[in-house]
Image (cartoon, coloured by chain):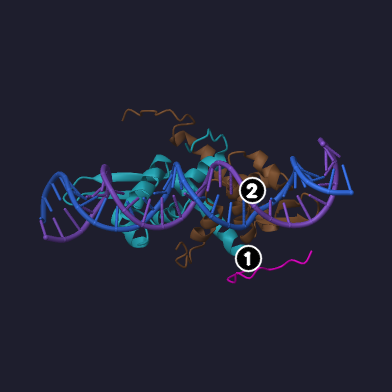
Chain colours: A cyan, B brown, C blue, D purple
Amino acid sequence: MKDLVSRCPIEEVMQVVSGRWPGLLIYYLKQGTKRFSDLRRDNPAISHKMLTMELRKLEDAGIVARSEFEGYPLRVEYDLTPAGLQLVPLLDALGSWWDATAAGRGHGSTLPVEVTE
Amino acid sequence: MKDLVSRCPIEEVMQVVSGRWPGLLIYYLKQGTKRFSDLRRDNPAISHKMLTMELRKLEDAGIVARSEFEGYPLRVEYDLTPAGLQLVPLLDALGSWWDATAAGRGHGSTLPVEVTE
DNA sequence: AGTAAATGACGCACCTTTTTGTAACCACGA
DNA sequence: TCGTGGTTACAAAAAGGTGCGTCATTTACT
């Protein structure tokens, strides 16, 4: 049971965009049309099962478009949809925010900065 | 092993902001100072274990600030940091994007809307 | 007076659920 | 036989829930 009638758009969008891969897949797809094997090459850490699952999820969310061409070794292309393209700058903004606020974190060290209150 | 030297800011930010709770916790915290029990009341579905873990994660990321006051039954307050406040409009933008592009999906209902293709 | 209960914000151990990886399999045609 | 994109079954790993313990102090009961 994972869907408790999430009326909150933030909760909903997180169910799709959240996780390790969606951001990266979108990042690579904004570079242009990619095939399944391209995306696997782009980030080798993802397993082919995960990739299919994530792509399917993004497809269902209307973020990526899947085009299947018939032919010899079967060819499938993935692109960002218009909605997906609109999402890109939002994710980029998140990335920028992360970099911009990096100073607030340990910018590397895990030292427990004791704030003497 | 989850951190394979993620040089990509999107991958990094997702490790913090991703998931079911961070978005919601930030959403409630932007309403003002909240205590542990307040946040539990705000969204009853989260367990105390999860809440502590998520708050700790957000704290480490510099998104929320934890203030501990000494006293009888122990009191702890949580607020958004300046960085956290900057994050709010970005998440809101995601929520708006989700709503704006809702037409491409099932426009709301969870019913298995069979699209006769 | 002395003991007991309760409070708020957790930590910890144990167990269940969910997610993810691995490997094998499918189809087709070069 | 290989390569493509994908599915399935099983196994491993990770995430998450539940309940109890803790700490220090106040209030409640006897």
The residue at 52%/34% (across/down) is: A4
Q: Quadrant of residue C27?
A: top left
Residue A70 x %, y %: 20, 45
- Mostly what secondary structure, the magenta segment? loop
Quadrant location of the C terminus of chain A? bottom right
Classed neighbour count for the residue bearing mark 1: other residues with Cα under 10 Å, few (<14), some (14–19), many (≥20): some
Label 2 belongs to which residue? B26
Amino acid type for the residue under numbered disc 2: Ile
The reply to whether the magenta stretch includes residue A79 is no
- Look at the image and say whether residue A106 sits in the magenta stretch: yes
In the rendered view, would you say B30 is above or below A111?
A: above
Task: Tell me residue C2's x, y (percent).
Answer: 83, 48
Residue D4 % position (x, y):
23, 54
Q: Nearer the viewer, residue A55 or C26?
A: C26
Residue at horizontal 34%, vertical 53%? A33
Q: Is residue B3 left or right of residue B80?
A: left
User: From where the camera sits, is residue B70 visible?
Assistant: no
Percent x, y for residue A11?
A: 55, 42
Q: Secondary structure at mark 2?
A: helix
Q: Which residues are magenta?
A: A103-117
- Name the residue type under label 1: Arg
Q: Where does label 1 land, which residue?
A: A105
Instruction: Give the CA separation, mark 1 to mark 2.
Output: 18 Å
Look at 52% across and 40% down and name the residue there: A12
Please report, as a chain letter, where disc 2 is located: B
Helix, strand or loop status at disc 1: loop
The answer to whether C6 appears left or right of B10 in the picture is right
Whether residue A85 is visible to the viewer of this picture, yes or no, is yes
Q: Which residue lies at the image location 21% right of the left edge and 49% below the top edge?
A: A74
